Image (cartoon, helix red, strand yellow):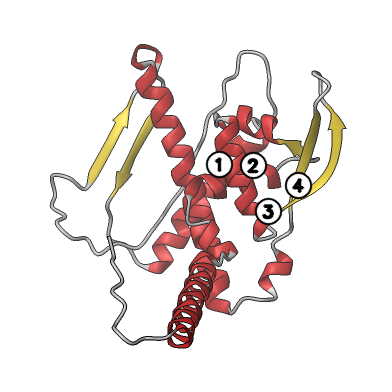
Amino acid sequence: MTVDIEPVGRDAKDILTSETQQFNINRLIIACCVVMMKKKDSKTPDKVLKKPVRGRILGWLSGRKGPKTKSEIGKALSLSNAAVHYHMRLLEEVDLVTLEETRLGPNGITEKLYLAKPLNSKEAQMTDKEKSDFYLRYTLDTMTEMQREGEALITSDWENARFIAGCYKTFATDEEIVALKEKISIILEEFFYTHKIEKKGASPQTITLGILPSKAAGWDASDQTQILDMLS
């Protein structure tokens, strides 16, 4: 609590001048705070996609043939309506998704349909490093979100869980890694193109692939292979 004590002999003009100055100071402080808040809240595609779930939403929308509603996005990605609304608003703010059209829903409510915008327009505004950082984060965040979803499904029904997950810690030359990638690509692409359409008796399965550099910190012969195989 602040108590103002007026000095003796202070006339009305002095008081008015002092109060006007204080008002201007307060207004300046408020203006500075607003500017700082706006600067802090400025968003870019790179910042928005730091949250893995947004990369997953964008990746899912990019793979669809037509625009989708928020409810369709939530159903496909196991997200609540509130979560989809929040993340879509941020993606729309940085121009990564666009409102394509509207339609009348089953309950007479107007539904909004969204499309993922091509990233080419964003690339023109990025440096080469920003492009690399953007696509690296986009890819790894999508993988992380898929693995998070898989973990939730597994832990909710361990008795029926069928999966394999793990990693191999290796030492290899660039040429050896390229040769490995070519072998893996042949197997995965053949499997993908013969299993990318939904069919009776088949359940959704995510296959993620990563060959990443490492510092090999703490490696020893006992932990260079970590595989959890629940398919055998």
| Disc with the residue nearer the chain's start (2 vs 3) | 2
Q: Quadrant of the N terminus?
A: bottom left
When asked about the image quadrant of residue 172, the answer is: bottom left
* Numbered label attached to residue 60: 2
**Viewer-proximal residue, 160 or 173?**
160
| Disc with the residue nearer the chain's start (1 vs 3) | 3
**Viewer-proximal residue, 89 or 175?**
89
Residue identifier under label 1: 188
Horizontal and vertical percent position of residue 14: 43, 87
Q: Nearer the viewer, mark 4 or mark 2?
A: 4
Residue identifier under label 4: 115
Q: Marks 2 and 3: CB-CB under 8 Å? A: no
Residue identifier under label 3: 92
Q: Please, what is the three-letter code of the amino acid marked with disc 3?
A: Glu
Q: Residue drawn at (52%, 64%), measured in percent from left and top?
A: 41
SS category of the residue bearing label 2 = helix
